[in-house]
C-alpha cells in the first residue's frame, strides 16, 4: 500500500495519523485532493483485493443492508462469519459488549432472530429428526422437532479440555501427590488427564506405577485434590497389576466421595501399577479452571 503522504499534496499529520483537510475557501484549491491514485490505493484496491481473497466476484447488486458482498468477503476471507465458533473471554456478555455472538448452552433460539446462523448451520430437513443439535423445533428445549419449527437448537458450550498433569508437581498452588496406606508407596510415575464432558460432568484418566515399601496384599492409594463420584456403593472398577506373571485375584476400585483407590490382592506383592477412566464429583483442585465459554457467531 502506498502511503497517503506519497500520493497527496494537501493533508495534515503523518502515518498512522494522516488526516484529510478542507480547503481554506470555496475557490481555494488547497484541500485534500480527490484523485485517481488516492481512490485506487484507498478504496478500489482494498475492496477488490478483499473480494478476490474471499473468492467472490461482484454480483451486480448495490451494496446495502442484507446484500453487502463486502461483509460476505470479510466473513469468508477471515473465517469469522455466522456459524463459526469463538472462545469468549470478555468480562461482560456479548449482549452488553455488542459482539455478534451467542454463548452456547444447548439453548433454543428463535429462527426469525438469527436467519444467517440458521442458514449456515441447519442440518437440513432430512437430518432434523436425529441430529444432536443445529435442528429445528417447536419449543426452545428441542423436545418437539419440526422442520417448520420456530426454534433453532444450538450445541452445548462446555468444551473438553485435555491436559496431562504429573504427580509430584504443583499446579494452581496445589501439590498433586499420591500417598499409600498401610504401606508407603514410592512413585515411579503418575500422570493424570482430567476432562469435562459436554453435560458438565468431570472424569479422570490416570496411569500410576510405583513400589510398596513392604509387600502387602491390601493397599489404598489416595490422590490429592480428587473426589471420586459420591454415590453410595458406587465403587468404580480400575485396572491394576503387579510384577508377577502368576494368576492372582486382584480387585481395584474407587471409594465414593474420596480420592482413594483401593487395591486388593490374594497374596503379597510390592510392585504395582493402576490405570482407569472414572467419574469425579467435581474438578480436581489442582486442575486448570478453563473459564472461557464457547460462543458462536450469528
Image (cartoon, helix red, strand yellow):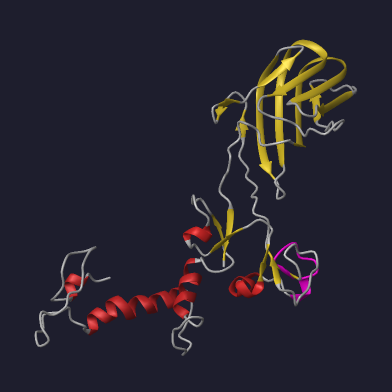
Q: 43 left or right of 253?
A: left
Picture residue at 49% right of the left edge, 62% below the top: 99
Q: Which residues are magenta?
A: 125-136
**Quarter of the image with the N terminus in it:** bottom left
Above or below for 213 versus 104: above
Q: Specify the farthest residue to the front.
A: 96
Q: Quadrant of residue 152 in the image?
A: bottom right
Q: Position of residue 15 (x, y in %)?
A: 21, 64
In-front residue for pair 207/18? 18
**Quarter of the image with the C terminus in it:** bottom right
Is residue 132 on the magenta stretch?
Answer: yes
Q: 273 left or right of 64?
A: right
In-front residue for pair 297/123? 297
Q: Specify the farthest residue to the bottom.
A: 60
Picture residue at 66% right of the left edge, 73% below the top: 111
Above or below for 99 versus 159: below
Q: 108 left or right of 170?
A: right
In-front residue for pair 244/15? 15
Q: Specify the farthest residue to the top.
A: 214
Q: Position of residue 45 (x, y in %)?
A: 33, 78
Amino acid at each position: 500500500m502506498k502511503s497517503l503522504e506519497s500520493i497527496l499534496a494537501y493533508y495534515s499529520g503523518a502515518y498512522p495519523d494522516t488526516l484529510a483537510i478542507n480547503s481554506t475557501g470555496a475557490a481555494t484549491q488547497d484541500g485534500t485532493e480527490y484523485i485517481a491514485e488516492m481512490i485506487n490505493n484507498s478504496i478500489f484496491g482494498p475492496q477488490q483485493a478483499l473480494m478476490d481473497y474471499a473468492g467472490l466476484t461482484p454480483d451486480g447488486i448495490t451494496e446495502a443492508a442484507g446484500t453487502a458482498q463486502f461483509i460476505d468477503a470479510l466473513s469468508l476471507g477471515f473465517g469469522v462469519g455466522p456459524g463459526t465458533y469463538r472462545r469468549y473471554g470478555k468480562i461482560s456478555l456479548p449482549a452488553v459488549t455488542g459482539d455478534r455472538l451467542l454463548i452456547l448452552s444447548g439453548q433454543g433460539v428463535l429462527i426469525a432472530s438469527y436467519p444467517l446462523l440458521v442458514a449456515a448451520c441447519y442440518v437440513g430437513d432430512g437430518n432434523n429428526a436425529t441430529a444432536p443439535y443445529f435442528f429445528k423445533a417447536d419449543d426452545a428445549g428441542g423436545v418437539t422437532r419440526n422442520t417448520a419449527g420456530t426454534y433453532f437448537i444450538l450445541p452445548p458450550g462446555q468444551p473438553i479440555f485435555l491436559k496431562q498433569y504429573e504427580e509430584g508437581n504443583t499446579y494452581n498452588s496445589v501439590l498433586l501427590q499420591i500417598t499409600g496406606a498401610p504401606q508407603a508407596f514410592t512413585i515411579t510415575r503418575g500422570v493424570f488427564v482430567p476432562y469435562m464432558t459436554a453435560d458438565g460432568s468431570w472424569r479422570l484418566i490416570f496411569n500410576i506405577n510405583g513400589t510398596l515399601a513392604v509387600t502387602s496384599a491390601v493397599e489404598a492409594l489416595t490422590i490429592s485434590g480428587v473426589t471420586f463420584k459420591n454415590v453410595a456403593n458406587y465403587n468404580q472398577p480400575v485396572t491394576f497389576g503387579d510384577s508377577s506373571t502368576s494368576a492372582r485375584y486382584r480387585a481395584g476400585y474407587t471409594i465414593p466421595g474420596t480420592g482413594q483407590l483401593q487395591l486388593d490382592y490374594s497374596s503379597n506383592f510390592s510392585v504395582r501399577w493402576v490405570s482407569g477412566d472414572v467419574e469425579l464429583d467435581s474438578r480436581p483442585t489442582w486442575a486448570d479452571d478453563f473459564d472461557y465459554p464457547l460462543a458462536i457467531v450469528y
